[in-house]
Image (cartoon, grey):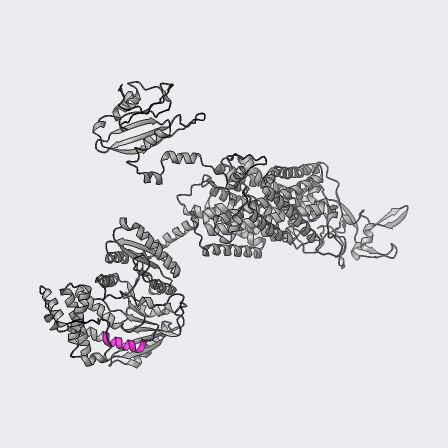
Amino acid sequence: CVGRMAGVTDDPPGFPYTPPGVDVLEGGKLTSNNVAGSSHDPFQSFAVASGAVSKPGSDAAQTCSLISTDHDDSIYGINMALYEVTNCLKQTLFFFVHQLSLLRTLCSDKILHLIYIVSLNYDAMLYVLNYLVPLYSQDEIDSTPMVSSLLNKLANYTNITQGVIEHEKAESEDGIQRVPKGPQMGTFIGVFLPCMQNILGVILFLRLTWIVGTAGIMDALAIVFMCCSCTMLTAISMSAIATNGVVPAGGSYYMISRALGPEFGGAVGLCSYLGTTFAGSMYILGTMEIFLTYIMPNAAVFKAGTGEPNGMQNNMRIYGTCCLAIMVLVVFVGVKYVNKLALVFLSCVMLSIMAIYAGVIQSAIKPPDSQVCLLGNRMLQNSMFDKCQKTEVINNVTTPTKLWTLFCKGDLGNATCNEYFTQNNLTVIQAVPGLLSGVISDNMWAHYGKYKTIVEKKGKSSEPASDKPIDMPYVFNDITTFFTLLVGIYFPSVTGIMAGSNRSGDLRDPQRSIPTGTIMAIATTSFIYISCVVLFGACIDGVVLRDKYGESVNGSLVVATLAWPSSWVIVIGSFFSCCGAGLQSLTGAPRILQAISRDGIMPFLQVFGHSKSNGEPTWALLLTAAICEIGILIGSLDNVAPILSMFFLMCYLFVNLACAVQTLLRTPNWRPRFKFYHWSLSFLGMSLSLSLMFVSSWYYALVVILISGCIYKYIEYRGAEKEWGDGIRGLSLNAAQYALIKLEEAPPHTKNWRPQLLVLLKLDSDLGVKHPRLLSFTSQLKAGKGLTIVCSVLEGTYMAREADAKLSEKNIKAAMAKEKTKGFCHVVVSSNQRDGFSHLIQSAGLGGMKHNAVLMAWPANWKQSESNLSWKNFIETVRETTAAHQALLVAKNIDSFPTNQERLGVGTIDVWWIVHDGGLLMLLPFLLRQHKVWRRCKMRIFTVAQMDDNSIQMKKDLQMFLYHLRLDAKVEVVEMNAGDISAFTNEKTLVMEQRSQMLKQMQLSKTEREREAQLIHDKNTKSHATLNDKATPTSDRVHMTWTKEKLISERNRLREANMTVRDIFSMKPDQTNVRRMHTAVKLNKVVVNKSQGAQLVLLNMPGPPKNQGGDENYMEFLEVLTEGLKRVLLVRGSGREVITIYS
């Protein structure tokens, strides 16, 4: 214990604590304890030591002496550091060593007590934790796990893929459940060999000789160099992504989706899936080509020369479909059988390549005896004759050979022969002259040919002929050849670089194995391809190289004529190699589809995420087989190869893009262990991939890009709610930050002005949107292409209403989504609504991206409200908006505005242009008419003229102004005479002032206010009964019954007031208010007369009074101004021009 180390011989009471039934290791001996330890003070200096106790005078004792001074007077707080070392004993339930450190910090005297405890069982552990809870609450411990728990999870973490775990857990044949095995594969077995097996394959054996003979060594090297460079650059980018954290199995789909987001990930994932699926088609077609052409030609259902032009393709379709069915059955039965055969297939590939190199060496010593027959410079099919002679002497008699009968008709003496046959001689040449023959110079340059032209030996003289050699036994070109076509056919031979990353869950150290193994495999295969190009051109005659199916060498595989010790090594090896690659494709493709389906980014694919009990993706396998059958029905390896080239190139393009984006963003999470990468290399790889797509087949490239774009937009439309911390969102963040910094905070130019709306919403008691049609109106203004910020205010403190604020934001976002309002949402908590709206007006937005207009609803029923806060807050908001030099839009009768689903019929949007304050009044109708709700409405502009104005000239000028503004609107000038102020206006003003003064002097309840106002109104209207009958009743009249006796009693109750009701009755209206009321009444009469049936009326909003004494009068003026109108939008401009006649 610490006390003993400090020289204290006596233990504190209750220590050391030993749980009952636990053996204690003390002094190197085990002693049994069967009695529960007594209670104790946990903050006394103590420790349970596992071993001999330190002696006084030791370093530990001196340290303990220092840190245990004056602990009796300390006030402790705890700072925890936990170090855990566990070692399990045989079938016991307690730990041998469990070290826990507790540091208690003294706030006043800064004294630390270091406590060492070895917890020997779970009870002791709980005992210690009971004293951590006072400082670190249980909620905090649950939400932020202790260091020991975190380290334990990291130590026990496994990155084995789900499929591997399910397979390991699946019951074996004898019914014994297996225990999941940890990742054990190294670089060579787990990455290098799988990549080699997937890269080397059908193209090497079936098409590389033909590519070398057609393109020549130089063009063939250019093709190989471009394709290998593309895969090497992609491997570098892939290595950087794969080493930036733990990458589970999933290959390119997982890496791209986590690096570029679900949209790109889904698009490229499906491209990878389709590429792998069509690769299965290509391998099956290659298998059938070897089988039907070189192993069992007699098995063909459609024989050549029987009048069937597509006989070979039909044979491929029939046998390919049967082969696909067998392979699907094998994969369905169990992927373990495919994995067991993988080594056999890889061995076939390596043996075949070794046979090629051995044959090259042998050709330098003794070239193989393989001869080719030429007629002039034209190559003949050896399978159609036995001797390369026109005639032969048998028993001293000259007789025609079988070859002669192919070109001539009739007897030898009077036969009719082909012109070219009679004019040219037959020549026999060596198909494989050997490494030292010098044939490399003849094969250096390209010999492209057109469809159905004869394969000829360049440089050999021949007599021209005008015959049509269609039915002759020549070797023909089955397709028109050119450089870009060969690129598309060759590129699948370098794919397969993702094989290592697909197995990352099975690797011991993926972050080291994936880069090393993949780059080594690409370097090795690139060397093999480049050396084969040179060696094929140096050993085999060019005319034989251009013979795609080996018809000139008795129907043998051309590369097999070079092999040693036997051509069957290549034939059999390439056959099993293609079979193995096809099985691997049918195994891997369904798992890619299953991974995409389980991520849930494309709902229509979710059915393919289901699997059998052992994890086999059955439905995905069936879809893969169906798509693979489409490739087989094409029937030609040369036509299928460019298709899968497109899909793989698209995949590689986005791998490079993902690395480049992450590198340029320099996000804190981008810390790959692989350091040999650069953004320029990734961009080069991306550019090379895109170039190869269009070089190979521009129309296939456009189709694949269109497919990827459709998938991207589909995922975006359906809402990819996955958040994987991808680079595209990081790129958007960087772009937004850059744009905001570049965007000046100064007001924009008039041509760049657009309404940036701050929408002030009010919430109901359930925290829902009180006026959802305000959001509808906002979305109908979206033609302005401006910013929209929807805000609301909750009264209270943020700590108390945090949950309400989040719920309110959720409700507002839901309402915005329903009304298709795109923008941002924010809810603030403030002590009162006035301050909250003030803060929003001042601080909403960011940098130069701030609002320039405020949209809010008119406070309905403000007169009948129990509190005057609603209209007072409204007026203060108007004042603050004006002070901030921002425009203000106030929608009156907002609940009658149309929703986005409504379509207004033929009507008008009337603009009453009284004051010019920047042109916003004319811009808003134009924006509204761009929306389908208001599209059928016409625009009318009214302006007011005095009697001494020239109305006709005003109308012409206004029409010319609108013409220059490019606005289509009808113009009308309304004349208003000043006239005498009517008695009704006086009465109206007087009632307004008396009511306002009474409410100030008497703090009455709602009912009392209404009754008092009614009495005043009744008294003052006795002398104006006739006028009142003619005038339109105003909205402030409250219909109630009131007696004079009741008024007297109420007056006596309020005699403490400064002004009596009699004084109020004797008031005279203020002349300023009278003039304002006169203007409001006259203008309202004109507006109602002209625009009562309009769909929307836009009016200039008068400014609020400077002093707060006239606030209620201001509300009355606005009520009178808009009385009798269905929908009104009051507009107050910011004072700066927002519309211009200039371009």
Nearer to the camera, 203 or 644: 644
Q: Quadrant of the C terminus?
A: bottom left
Task: Provide the major secondary structure of the magenta segment.
Answer: helix
Between 665 and 24, the one lying in front of the other is 24
Q: Position of residue 1013 (x, y in %)?
A: 17, 70
In this rendering, position of residue 989 left or right of residue 973: left
Magenta-highlighted residues = 1080-1091
Q: Quick check: 551 above or below 1038?
A: above
Residue 932 vs 633, above or below: the answer is: below
Side (left or right) of 782 relative to 316:
left
- Residue 761 pos. (x, y %): 30, 60
Q: Please report the residue visible at 45 percent of the width from the left and 40 percent of the height from the top.
A: 245
Which residue lies most toward the right here? 396
Work out whether 683 lies above or below 1074.
above
Name the residue nearer the viewer: 171 or 908: 171
> Picture quarter containing residue 746?
bottom left
Q: Is residue 1087 magenta?
A: yes
Question: Would you place residue 940 above or below residue 594 in this image?
Answer: below
* Quarter occupied by the N terminus: top left
Q: Is residue 31 visible?
A: yes
Residue 628 picture location, percent across and down: 61, 50
- Asked whether the viewer can see residue 1054, the reply is no
Q: Residue 768 location, x and y as percent?
A: 33, 58
**Marker count (numbered):** 0
Q: Nearer the viewer, residue 420 or 194?
A: 194
Q: Is residue 526 magenta?
A: no
